[in-house]
Image: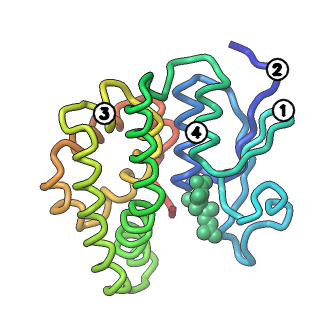
Amino acid sequence: MTYAHRPIVYGARYSVYVQALLLCLEEKQVPYDLVEVDVFADGGAPSEHLSRHPFGRIPAFEHGALRLYETAPICRYVDEAFDGPALQPATAAARARMGQAISIADNYAYRSLVWGLYVETVEKPARGDRPDESLVAAAHEQAATCLGALQQLAPEAPWLVGDAPTLADLHLAPMFTLFLQAPAAVDLMKDAPRLRRWFDGMRERPSVRRACPSPRTA
Ligand SMILES: N[C@@H](CCC(=O)N[C@@H](CS)C(=O)NCC(=O)O)C(=O)O
């Protein structure tokens, strides 16, 4: 399929939020351009990026005249504006469940799984820095709650919220790619066998292999 405008993603491949959007574009088989923006560069986000994203985060997105930021609504737009497999469930109840999983990711999992466990216990030691143990302890507790909550969303389903992958699976897979490298993940995942099976399925998807290479940070 060709489109009048090729979407542009502003961001960096190491970002879990950029990866979630790239996964969405890959699953829909939409060609896109990625314009590199490093918000962690010395001095913070480049000033021209603030016109795309007033909070200086990545990703930002353009499609023709439409400019968007915030990953969840961008992904909903991509799913609805382009051909390809539907990435949102058909029923209102299942769509609400999908939104709930995405909110868990944004409000609780990103901080604990990515920053509290991956960055503190994998990335910091790799660059010779010591983890902040109080931060790690708090993240561990929050991570356990996140895993329990995610397991309960659709206890019998193969994907996070049902019988087919949705935007929720794409939103969370990049966060899990980092989290699973943290030493604490071994024990935490023992209590989350459904999530283990889910992630084993996700990591086999060609989109995940392309969009979630192993990491730098967040
Ligand atoms: N709520 C934003 C979160 C995006 C986000 O936090 N991106 C991170 C990279 S994964 C970022 O830009 N961090 C820069 C910073 O915290 O200064 C979204 O959904 O897009």
Q: Quadrant of ligand 1?
A: bottom right
- Local SS, label 4: helix
In this rendering, the answer to whether 71 lies above or below 80 is below
- Asked if marks 1 and 3 touch (Cβ < 8 Å), the reply is no
Q: Which comes before the other along the chain, label 3 or label 2?
A: 2
Q: Nearer the viewer, residue 57 or 215?
A: 57
Q: Quadrant of residue 3?
A: top right
Q: Amino acid at mark 1?
A: Gly
Mark 3, ligand 1, within 8 Å: the answer is: no
In the displayed structure, would residue 133 be above or below residue 82?
below
Q: Residues within 10 Å of mark 2 (few under 14, many from 20)?
A: few
Q: Residue at x 43, y 32 (%)?
A: 166
Q: Which amino acid type is shown beneath numbered disc 4?
A: Leu
The answer to whether marks 1 and 2 mark residues whose Cβ atoms lie closer than 8 Å is yes
Quadrant in which the N terminus appears: top right
Q: Which residue is mark 1?
A: 64
Q: Say whether marks 1 and 4 touch (CB < 8 Å).
A: no
Q: Name the kind of residue labelled 2 in the image.
A: Ala
Q: Is mark 2 within 8 Å of ligand 1?
A: no
Q: Which mark is residue 4?
A: 2
